[in-house]
């Protein structure tokens, strides 16, 4: 069973209309834009994964059903925004849940007109005729790609045709719009971060030796669902010990051992917007000297990177700040040897810190938007939201470092919104300092009177 979801999104019809109007305003005269909905994804035999709408389509419509298509036609006298979607079907709705149908969908989404998706072949070719450009994300929807090519071949073959319209990648226009978040979007993202921070606190409080990684995952997912965030924004990572060295580890099946750290990377999706938080803490509740020394370097790097998230700075400045702090910290611990500038220039730090400090965040956990514009790092502006997640990872078999540091992976990640006043950490409620973490774990373990599992 899949079923369409029609829960309130927290975004008004007026805001969806403004988004479409801004997109149309950036399109060339005589053009047309096509934005498809996501398809249902088969999980096994005749069961499907829970439906997740395509973010671009959802951003422009708020419509949360598969088998749909948005067409924007600037200057069309009958209305610039058209939706194609499934018709009502009592028998199918009995099994899979309600459908809005074209008429109700147009009304609910504030669109000019809507038609049955079955009429696409009869209507869309006529809309394409005489257009100079078609804005469309070619390659993401192969079946629709083929249908569009067939339509255009027919138009090309028609007597007196002036030639096919130019195909232009829609992403360049649309993803720039998505990069700047509205006040409503920021409120939703703040709530997603709040829910996720509480989930991290809950997992941290229950952590102790003898549990398995999946026990912490269960605590996190429980907190998500209980708060109304039915899905994680991405597969939850719970990596104990050396498992923290695997960036996208998600087996979550190993025991949590006394003396190890555990890295937990988890965020919910709330009302179609993602959170993305990572915390690293000692399974026993207390950091060892070596663990604390590395942790404090990562935390200092994160705080310095966040300070660089200011209007007028560019995208690479937070990363550069984190690299400098981590490299100096590794020199101070004797894990790197040489001049700070030379080690940064040579990339020697990448042996221990191999990823960038963050990414855009929004409807997608790795959200839309370019990091460079015309070959230059993008300038940071109010309304942008990003993660800040430096880390240090030391291989378990790296004999060039003292044994006490081997097999340690540490990452600290928060969600940061840039405002006119500066950066705001949306996920600040998740314990982060050594003192906060040890206090949270001590309090949580003190409340445990019997085995949870």
Image (cartoon, rainbow, N blue to C red):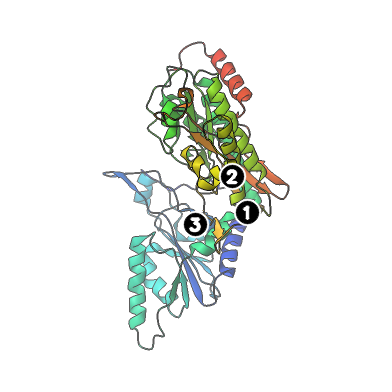
- Quarter containing the N terminus: top left
Residue 81 shown left or right of residue 215 in the figure: right
Where is residue 301 drawn, in percent x and y?
A: 60, 37
2 or 217, which lies in front? Answer: 217
The circle on residue 424 is none
Asked which secondary structure carries label 2, the reply is: helix
153 or 129, which lies in front? Answer: 153
Asked which secondary structure carries label 3, the reply is: helix
Instruction: Choose mark 3 or mark 1, whichever is in front.
Output: 1
Whether pointer 2 and pointer 3 mark residues with C-beta atoms closer than 8 Å, the reply is no
User: Earlier along the polypeptide chain: callout 3 or callout 1?
Assistant: 3
Give the labeled residue for mark 1. Answer: 314
Give the labeled residue for mark 3. Answer: 56
Residue 414 shown left or right of residue 167 in the figure: right
- Residue at 59% x, 24% y: name it: 437
Gap in Å between the C-alphas at discs 2 and 1? 21 Å
Give the labeled residue for mark 2. Answer: 341
Asked which secondary structure carries label 1, the reply is: loop
Instruction: Choose mark 2 or mark 1, whichever is in front.
Output: 2
């Amino acid at each position: 069973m899949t079923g369409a979801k029609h829960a309130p999104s927290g975004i008004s019809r007026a805001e969806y209309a403004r988004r479409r109007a801004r997109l149309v305003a950036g399109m060339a005269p005589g053009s047309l834009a096509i934005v498809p909905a996501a398809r249902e994804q088969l999980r096994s035999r005749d069961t499907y994964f829970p439906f997740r709408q395509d973010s671009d389509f959802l951003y422009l419509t708020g419509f949360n059903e598969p088998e749909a298509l948005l067409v924007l036609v600037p200057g069309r006298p009958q209305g610039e925004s058209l939706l194609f979607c499934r018709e009502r079907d009592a028998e199918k709705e009995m099994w899979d849940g309600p459908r809005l149908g074209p008429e109700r969908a147009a009304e609910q989404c504030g669109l000019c007109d809507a038609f049955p998706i079955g009429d696409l072949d009869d209507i869309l070719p006529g809309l394409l005729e005489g257009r100079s450009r078609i804005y469309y994300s070619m390659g993401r929807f192969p079946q629709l790609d083929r249908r569009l090519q067939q339509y255009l071949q027919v138009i090309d073959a028609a007597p007196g045709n002036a030639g096919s319209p130019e195909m232009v990648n829609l992403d360049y226009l649309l993803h720039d719009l998505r990069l700047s978040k509205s006040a409503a979007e920021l409120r939703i993202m703040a709530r997603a971060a709040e829910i996720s921070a509480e989930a991290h606190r809950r997992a941290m409080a229950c952590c102790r030796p003898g549990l398995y990684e999946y026990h912490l995952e269960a605590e996190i997912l429980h907190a998500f669902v209980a708060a109304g965030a039915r899905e994680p924004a991405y597969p939850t990572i719970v990596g104990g010990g050396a498992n923290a060295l695997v960036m996208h580890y998600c087996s979550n099946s190993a025991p949590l051992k006394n003396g190890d750290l555990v890295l937990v990377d988890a965020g919910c999706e709330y009302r179609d917007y993602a959170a993305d938080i990572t915390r690293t803490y000692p399974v026993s509740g207390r950091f060892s000297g070596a663990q604390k020394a590395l942790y404090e370097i990562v935390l200092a790097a994160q705080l310095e990177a966040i300070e660089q998230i200011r209007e007028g700075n560019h995208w690479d400045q937070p990363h550069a700040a984190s690299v400098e702090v981590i490299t100096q910290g590794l020199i101070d611990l004797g894990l790197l040897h040489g001049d700070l500038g030379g080690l940064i220039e040579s990339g020697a730090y990448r042996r221990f810190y191999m990823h960038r400090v963050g990414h855009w965040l929004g409807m997608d956990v790795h959200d839309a938007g370019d990091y460079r514009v015309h070959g230059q790092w993008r300038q940071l502006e109010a309304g942008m939201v990003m993660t800040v997640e430096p880390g240090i990872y030391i291989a378990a078999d790296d004999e060039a470092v003292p044994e006490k540091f081997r097999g340690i992976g540490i990452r600290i990640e928060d969600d940061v919104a840039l405002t006119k006043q500066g950066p705001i950490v949306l996920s600040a409620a998740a314990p982060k300092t050594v003192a906060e973490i040890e206090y949270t774990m001590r309090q949580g373990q003190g409340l445990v009177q019997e085995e949870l599992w």
